[in-house]
Image (cartoon, rainbow, N blue to C red):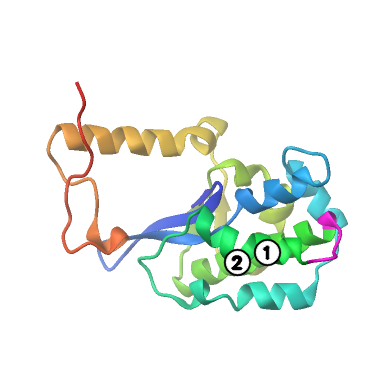
Amino acid sequence: MNLGGISNISFKQNQKRIAFDISPFNMVLNFLAEKCGKRYDENGDLARKGSINQNLLNELNSLEFYQMNPPKSLGIEFSNEFIFPMIQNSSEKPENLLATFTEHFTVQISNVLNENQIQNVLVTGGGAYNQFFIQRLKNKYSGEIVLPEKEIIEFKEALIFGLMGLLKLEKKVNVLRSVTGAKTDHSSGVILN
């Protein structure tokens, strides 16, 4: 699982690779941390001080995207259309919004992990350093959370894109229809000289 601007996951199910976006993540948490004068919520300390707004949490958890089946993906457009307007229309202080959104992401991510009976999950991306989120996730997820060494947390995505480039050079499949919803597996990308 990658906890970057958006949280996403990849796993094998019935001998098929499944991957999809779960929810926004750091793009929202960092936006809220900036309202507190910070670049990001280090260790989740700001969220830890806040209180959850249950009405907002219920509204977030009922967004249509979460009812959709994979393959599915998110971009900044989702946050611009649904998430940021909720933040702008809220009178809650940023710490309470951080607590509420952290809980929202915890609910959505734990739902995906538990519903797919994932026994253990390797967590990477900047969100892996959010100790408060990881603690909340441990309370809702019945499997094991694995936090690898710093190099994997920070560079796994770059390594994967490097692998995709190598597969393209070798004219091998680097995009799976089970992940993208395309009609066939294929080799995507352009080699520039």
Gap in Å between the C-alphas at discs 1 and 2?
6 Å
Q: Is residue 7 left or right of residue 16?
A: right
Q: Position of residue 140 (x, y in %)?
A: 65, 68
Residue 92 inside the magenta-drawn segment: yes
Q: Position of residue 45 (x, y in %)?
A: 81, 47
The magenta span reads 90-95
Q: Looking at the picture, how far across and down is residue 133, in whole percent? A: 69, 55
- Magenta span contains residue 178: no
* Marks 1 & 2, CB-CB < 8 Å contact: yes
Residue beneath disc 2: 82
The residue shown at (66%, 42%) is: 129
Judged left or right of residue 98, residue 85 is left
The kind of secondary structure element at disc 2 is: helix
Which quadrant of the view contains residue 160? top left
Q: Which residue is mark 1?
A: 85
Inspect this view and state whether residue 103 appears.
Answer: no
- Give the number of the disc on residue 107: none
Up/down of 60 relative to 77, above or below: below
Q: Nearer the viewer, residue 147 or 65?
A: 65
Determine whether the residue tagged by mark 1 lies in a helix, strand or loop.
helix
Q: Residue at x 55, y 63 (%)?
A: 143
Q: Quadrant of residue 164?
A: top left
Looking at numbered disc 2 in the image, what kind of residue is underneath it?
Answer: Phe
- The residue under the point 67% across, 77% down is 59
